[in-house]
Image (cartoon, grey):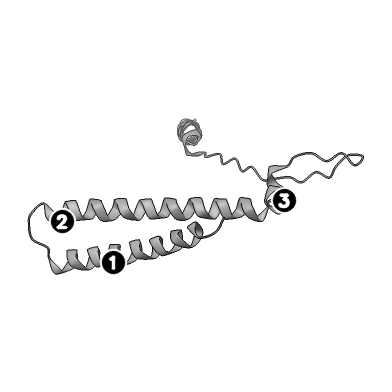
């Protein structure tokens, strides 16, 4: 009789602790959904548009236009960065050596972007 109460108390405590762990585990779950392209072959020779394979059918002109767009976008970004850094560093009226290095680096990147964008403006 004496051990019966101790045994029931311990069993009830274990049951309560188990319930606490079960209720808190739901917040620890994380679901990740991954979408992968699936190639389906044409049914009875029917060809349909599949964006996964679209790059294979691109024309050289389309590829050129896309590269030109990205080169010009990169040029605009570099110009914006340089302008923003010049304004930021000119606020106090003194350029530290570190700021001068950053500006020189921005100018080099801008020159490279200009050169690349100029390559695409020469043709077509």
- Tag 1 secondary structure: helix
Kindly state the secondary structure of the residue where label 2 is placed. Answer: helix
Residue 57 numbered mark, or none: 3
User: Residue 8: where, in percent of width, then height?
Assistant: 49, 31
Q: Is residue 72 left or right of residue 100?
A: right
Check residue 89 in the rendering and tell me which mark sits there, or answer none. Answer: 2
Q: Which sits in the foreground, 86 or 34? A: 86
Q: Which mark is residue 48?
A: none
Say left or right for 10 vs 54: left
The answer to whether 12 is drawn above or below residue 70 in the figure is above
Mark 1, residue position: 105
Q: Earlier in the sequence, mark 2 or mark 1?
A: 2
Spot occupied by residue 6 in the image (x, y as percentages of width and height) = 45, 34
Relative depth, front residue between 78 and 44: 78
Residue 39 in picture, x, y percent from top left? 76, 46
Q: Kindly identify the residue that appears in the image at 52 percent across and 38 percent down.
A: 29
Q: Is residue 19 left or right of residue 47?
A: left
């Amino acid at each position: 009789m004496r051990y019966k109460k101790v045994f029931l108390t311990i069993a009830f405590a274990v049951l309560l602790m188990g319930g606490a762990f079960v209720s808190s585990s739901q917040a620890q779950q994380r679901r990740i959904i991954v979408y992968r392209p699936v190639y389906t072959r044409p049914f009875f020779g029917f060809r349909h548009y599949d964006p996964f394979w679209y790059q294979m059918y691109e024309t050289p002109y389309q590829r050129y236009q896309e590269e030109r767009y990205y080169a010009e976008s990169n040029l605009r970004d570099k110009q914006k960065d340089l302008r923003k850094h010049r304004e930021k560093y000119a606020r106090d009226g003194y350029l530290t050596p570190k700021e001068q290095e950053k500006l020189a680096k921005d100018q080099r990147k801008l020159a490279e972007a200009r050169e690349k964008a100029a390559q695409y403006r020469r043709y077509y």
